[in-house]
């Protein structure tokens, strides 16, 4: 049996709200499927990744040395991201090229989120959607 902060996974998904793309990038603990940190952005940029990693830093237990799994996205290959992982004793793990099944836990989280709080719903604004997204994740 595993333990908290032993195996983590991350990914980015795009959600279209009206004419606006909203990007969600969480880090999920595979021990209990808890979202440990996340960021929401209107652009999938390095600032979003910094925000997510800052959130993780605030919850990171002393002495933890987790494996953090992702796909081969540009953000996970970026020197700043890799430097953060090294500084925090996090082992980087990336999917093989063309193998989305390696990150199946994150894909399942996104499907569940979209079915439960996104598909078929109407949002008055992007801001309302983002607020509902925060509520969903904290639930």
Image: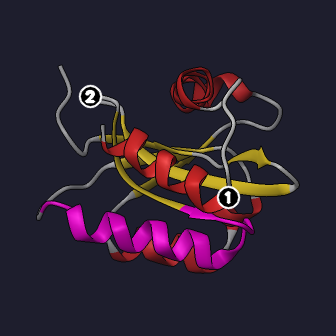
Residue 118 rendering spot, x and y as whole percentages = 63, 32
- Identify the magenta region: 40-61
* Tally of marks: 2
Q: Mostly what secondary structure, the magenta segment? A: helix
* Pointer 1 or 2: first along the chain: 2
Q: Is residue 139 above or below residue 86?
A: above
Q: CA distance from mark 1 to mark 2?
A: 30 Å
Q: Is residue 127 above or below residue 68?
A: below
Q: Is residue 33 above or below residue 79?
A: above
Residue drawn 31% across the image and 45% down it: 138
Residue drawn 51% across the image and 26% down it: 105
Determine the residue located farthest toward the left in the rendered image.
62
State which quarter of the image contains the C terminus: top left
Relative to 115, 135 lies left or right:
left
State which quarter of the image contains the N terminus: top left
Quarter assignment of residue 63? bottom left
In the image, 75 versus 108, the foreground residue is 108
Residue 6 rendering spot, x and y as whole percentages = 26, 41
Q: Residue under circle 2?
A: 32
Quarter assignment of residue 4? top left
Mark in the foreground, 1 or 2: 1
Q: Is the residue marked by circle 2 packed among few (<14), some (14-19), or many (20+) residues within 10 Å?
A: few
Q: Is the residue marked by circle 1 packed among few (<14), some (14-19), or many (20+) residues within 10 Å?
A: some
Residue 77 rendering spot, x and y as whole percentages = 69, 64
91 part of magenta stretch: no
In the image, 94 versus 134, the foreground residue is 134
Residue drawn 11% across the image and 65% down it: 62
Looking at the rendered structure, the secondary structure element under dot 2 is loop
Residue 29 - label = none
Residue 115 rendering spot, x and y as whole percentages = 61, 20
Q: Residue under circle 1?
A: 126
């Amino acid at each position: 049996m595993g333990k908290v902060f032993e195996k983590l996974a991350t990914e980015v998904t795009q959600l279209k709200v009206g004419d606006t793309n909203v990007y969600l990038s969480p880090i999920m603990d595979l021990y209990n499927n808890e979202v440990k940190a996340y960021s929401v952005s209107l652009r999938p940029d390095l600032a979003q990744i910094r925000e997510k990693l800052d959130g993780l830093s605030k919850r990171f237990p002393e002495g933890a040395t987790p494996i953090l799994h992702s796909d081969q996205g540009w953000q996970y290959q970026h020197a700043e991201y890799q430097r953060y992982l090294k500084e925090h004793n996090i082992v980087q793990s990336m999917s093989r090229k063309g193998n989305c099944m390696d990150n199946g836990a994150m894909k399942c989280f996104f499907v569940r989120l979209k079915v439960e709080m996104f598909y078929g719903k109407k949002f008055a604004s992007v801001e309302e959607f983002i607020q509902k997204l925060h509520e969903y994740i904290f639930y």
